[in-house]
Amino acid sequence: MHRTHTCGELTISDLDKTVVLSGWVQKSRDLGGMTFIDVRDRYGVTQLVFDPADDETLRLQARALGREYVIKVTGRVIERESKNTKLSTGDIEIKVSSLDVLNAAKLPPFTIEDDTDGGDELRMKYRYLDLRRNPVRNNLVLRHRLAQETRKYLDAHHFLEVETPVLIKSTPEGARDFVVPSRMNSGEFYALPQSPQTFKQLLMVSGFDRYFQIVKCFRDEDLRADRQPEFTQIDCEMAFVEQEDIILLFEGLITHLFKVIKGVDFGAFPRMSYDQAMRLYGSDKPDIRFGMAFVELNDVLKGAGFPVFDNAELVVGFNAKACAPYTRKQLDALTDYVRRPQIGASGLVYLRYNEDGSLKSSVDKFYSAEQLSQWAQAFNAQPGDLLLVMAGDTDKVRKQLNELRLEVASQLGLRDKNTYAPLWVTDFPLLEWDDESGRYHAMHHPFTSPKTEDIPLLDEQPARVRANAYDLVINGTEVGGGSIRIHDRELQSLMFKHLGFTPEEAQKQFGFLLEAFTYGAPPHGGIAFGFDRLAAIFAGLESIRDVIAFPKNNAGRDVMIDSPSLIADEQLAELGIAIR
Ligand code: ASP
């Protein structure tokens, strides 16, 4: 027998029991002639004591143990003299009578402690050791709980968990596909799913009614902190539903998760249309933990002879509440911030509403005192406020001001990770113009249904067509998105046409779906949540890598298994592939 108890289990109520424990040596120390060893497993740490008065040979054996040795001990539970209230087992220790070394261990390349000395790359190379550390493991425990609670909730609402294939054909979700060569069909390739989108729709045609899957998806995109080439979705689809049904049911899921895991209770989530979100926050995923909504100022600030404003399509700003004391240096730093190439603004104008009621702007020479006061009124400003204003082309300047709003909020400490602000963003545009390819793309994906009343606009004003699509945003992060789908062959064909597919191409790529729609497809819709992002938000982490057991680095590499890697010439030959 390897153990009678785990290392996190024994308490004062177990006094005098003879127990067997197994685990890893966390650390050892000598004190008052005795040797103490902390033995660790997933459940906790228990202190072992080796007393020379009992057995000096055993004590010397214990002293020789290195960090991370795997050991098994037998001993008696005794009360500790100096208790450790931080440990669940802190009232007791084990007076050891026998010790087995189950496996020796090399000195780990970094310390297996909550705060380690290991850098990122090293920890990733030895991820299996990193995962021994409490904070890392706890993130995965949290992830596990989120997955279990998700299953519980969806099961209770009659969702069936169905697995869909991984070797498929491209699902256009806007990213590049990962492809897998087929040996048996030389020259042909599978694509890995960017999501199970078409399969879950087919399950609705099959009458499954409610589907979900916690599923790996693959997208060959440039990586960022919240992106991995393979990531996990909570993927869902429902038949005979409208947008409102889906929103309410999944608001219920998120509410459930926050309640059981964080003890946070939300009321109904606020909602905002895409247009509103862009107008008020310059982003389709606004962080509404704080205000600072945009105020448009064309009427107030244009026509005073300041060319930057006069020539701009949009003059827009926000009120940085109580920031009037910002120094010249701080304001210059904000100007530099928006001028960085990543943001690309030409400049930043401010109006300072001083505590004494006076107004001071960076463009005073163009505006009278009266105009400055109208400017302040437009923001509903109070003494002590700082009004930050930018100008330019509407879409661009909104995005730039969004970056500034987030930066100022971060500086003011308004983006507290323990405050949660969920938000539904609805009524997304159906199509999005892409300069590079010179044509429209589906903003969500090609299976999203346009709003019925907007269908007549498709030919003449495609950009104005709104979709039955919605995103769930939490704290400025898009955690989920979905739509009501097209379930009619004609409309789906029309959609493909607008996306630039010839009828032959549409048939070739999506013939199976178009055909399925002719066999009685029910109205349906769904949503998918980025499970890694959701877990990162629950864990209060920026990077999704920390909630993934074996993540890839920013170059898409797994440095532990050294992948991707070259394959043997024979393997290439078998696949009929030549590397240039
Ligand atoms: N398949 C979509 C996505 O991955 C989600 C959905 O529409 O359900 O974003």
Image (tube, helix red, strand yellow):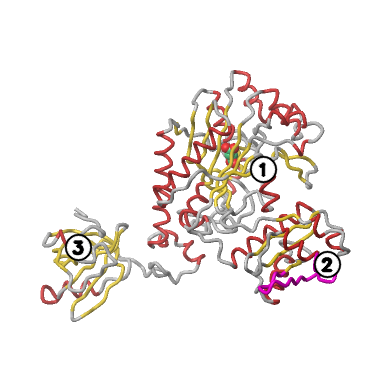
Considering only vertical position in the picture, is 10 above or below 151? below
Of callouts 3 and 2, which one flags the residue occurring earlier in the amino acid sequence?
3
Horizontal relation, residue 273 to residue 246: left or right: right
Between the C-alphas of marks 2 and 1, the distance is: 47 Å
Ligand 1 lies in which image quarter? Answer: top right
Q: Position of residue 101 (x, y in %)?
A: 24, 64
> Could you say which is closer to the camera, residue 321 or residue 388?
321
Badge 2 amino acid: Tyr
Residue hosting label 1: 174
Q: Name the element at disc 1.
A: loop
Horizontal relation, residue 69 to residue 92: left or right: right
Q: Is residue 260 visible?
A: yes
Badge 1 amino acid: Gly
> Could you say which is closer to the camera, residue 378 or residue 426?
378
Q: Position of residue 279 (x, y in %)?
A: 70, 50
Between the C-alphas of marks 1 and 3, the distance is: 56 Å
Q: Is residue 193 visible?
A: no
Considering only vertical position in the picture, is 163 above or below 99? above
Considering only vertical position in the picture, is 518 above or below 94? above
Of callouts 1 and 3, which one flags the residue occurring earlier in the amino acid sequence?
3
On whether ligand 1 comes within 8 Å of the CB at mark 2, the answer is no
> Could you say which is closer to the camera, residue 543 or residue 566?
543
Q: Is residue 356 magenta?
A: yes
Mark 1 surroundings: few (<14), some (14-19) or many (≥20) residues within 10 A: some
Q: Name the element at disc 2.
A: loop
User: Which of the labelled discs sits on residue 73, or is there none?
Assistant: 3
Badge 3 amino acid: Val
Q: Name the element at disc 3.
A: strand
On whether ligand 1 comes within 8 Å of the CB at mark 1, the answer is no
What range is drawn magenta here?
Answer: 352-370
User: Which of the labelled discs sits on residue 367, or is there none?
Assistant: 2
On whether ligand 1 comes within 8 Å of the CB at mark 3, the answer is no
